[in-house]
Amino acid sequence: MKSSKLNILLIEDNPDDQELIQEYLCDGDFNVNILSIRQNLQSGIERLKKKDIDIVLLDLSLPDSFGLDGFKEISANYPEIPVVILTGLSNSESALEAIRVGAQDYLVKGDYDPALLFKTINYAIERNKMITSLFKANLQLKEARSTALQLVNVCNIAREEVEATQSDLQRQKEGLEHFAYVSTHDLRAPVVNLQSLLKFIDRKNYANEQNAVIINKMDITVEQMSETLHDLIEVVAVTKEAEQRKPEVLKLESILNKVILNIEQLVKLQNAKIICDFSKADQIRYVPGHIKSIFQNLVTNAIKYKDPKRDPVINIESTKSNGYTCIKVQDNGCGIDMDKHGKKIFTMFKQLHIDSKGKGLGLYIVKSQIEALGGKIEVESKIGKGTLFTIHLKDQLNGN
Amino acid sequence: MEIKLKRILVIDDDETSNFINEIIIGRAEIAHDVKVFICANEALEYLKNGNDFPDLILLDINMPFIDGWEFLQAYFDCRFNQKHKTLICMLSSSIYESDRTRAASYPDRVEFISKPLTVESLHELATIVKERYAKVLD
């Protein structure tokens, strides 16, 4: 068996040993291309700089180095080159130690023949090739692993984003389905009524007194339809507004005053008293329009659903905590039976008072407006005592 | 109609709808008496108080307090359907198939009519009611 052409560096100061190895290498199966011989470690390392050496045979006792130091210096600078240690009998401990720290093999002087030298050199080279490729593979694995981890991270982030988007979409979808149901029903109802009423009109005798009654019903129906349409448009506006309008610093008291002015007639008619205390939190950074809509709906409700036995009194106060502005709207109205109707209060459609004409969209709009901007609304109520709405509005940052 | 129903109950919170329903029921000439409730709760009280039971109930779905489905649940909870042959018909502006399917899902037959109520649909309902009574006589 012939080995491939080898470039061998022998670092050995003993002429006898040099000669012996030279002799063995020239003999038999070896196919030596270059045999460089150096007397000391530094000149050996100098020779390695050419980077053409396949294997180093290193004596452990050199003029400029003794023991493992020489090996350590070579392997630190040329880790890819296999090293076989040459050692005397007395120094076999060091040889073993060298193998532990990475030398390929060792030969005990005077205790090897050409065959063993051949085997040792070739095994050392082959083993080194394997170790080098293992080392490379390990590096690649590590790289692959860290790439994989990065990918997993990216995937996790993406998944979280997708999940958030999905639940957002699901909520929007449910909202839209509900909206579609309510709008088709609420708009279809008056249209159907109008169609029926039109058929009842006596067209042969317009003076028929019954016609006046029917036309009056038609007036009511058209009015109802117009209100529903207005409410539905407001529901649509809620989401759009939250997306488009920039938050501004708003003074709560001046907004409330504008609302009271808007519903002046209702307030006077019912002799309602509105008391406010905004001293703890007098302004909020929020989307304009929402606060007004919230005040308008809650105050109007409080007056509309007053207790018939007393004039309505509405207390409004505000506080701040942790980036939220809390507004409480308390009335002394007829109250809501929370056990029976608690769940329905904020649902589109569910109107909890018989003698009102609204379609029950007001509180739905309020809730949508608040939740669209990260806030929440809660309600407590007792029949005959009144109702308390607690709203937590999230202060909006610049640029929303 | 040869034989008229004794009584029809109409439960709807919309007064215009009730105005229309009463005129249509009158024109269909299928009942001696029509009772109208704008609140499902009051209708339920009326039935519980042992008044003459109606042969037909026209029930709106979307109402405040108790909606049509909740009324229906209460009606079955009171086991009225076991004591009486009364036919219940949901009468709604809804054109959603899901409402129609939901009405059909009850073990006891529940009809569904999408408004407007017409003389023809009332005649069909009256025929179903009469068939029910005929079965009892068998």
Image (cartoon, coloured by chain):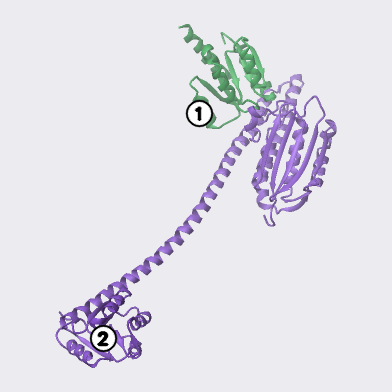
Q: In this image, A177 relative to A277: left or right?
A: left
Q: In this image, A154 relative to B65: left or right?
A: left
Q: In this image, B106 relative to A278: left or right?
A: left
Q: Quadrant of the C terminus of chain B?
A: top left
Q: How many marks on residues?
A: 2
User: How would you rate the neighbour count of disc 2 (Cα within 10 Å): few for under 14, some for 14-19, many for 20 or more?
Assistant: many
Q: Is residue B112 visible?
A: yes
**What residue sits right under mark 1 in the picture?**
B101
Q: Position of residue A91 (x, y in %)?
A: 27, 81
Tell which subunit mark 1 falls on: B
Q: In front of the other: label 2 or label 1?
A: 2
Above or below B37: residue A149 = below
Q: Colour of chain A?
A: purple
Question: Which residue is the extreme one toward the front?
Answer: A90
Q: Position of residue B103 (x, y in %)?
A: 52, 25
Image quadrant where residue B122 sits: top right
**What residue sits right under mark 2 in the picture?**
A8
User: How would you rate the neighbour count of disc 1 (Cα within 10 Å): few for under 14, some for 14-19, many for 20 or more?
Assistant: few
Q: In this image, B130 relative to B23: left or right?
A: left
Q: Is residue A208 visible?
A: no
Tell me the distance, in whole angstroms, between the alpha carbons under discs 2 and 1: 91 Å
- Circle number at residue A51: none
Chain letter, green: B
- Front-most of B78 and B135? B78
Above or below A257: residue B109 = above
At label 1, the amino acid type is Thr
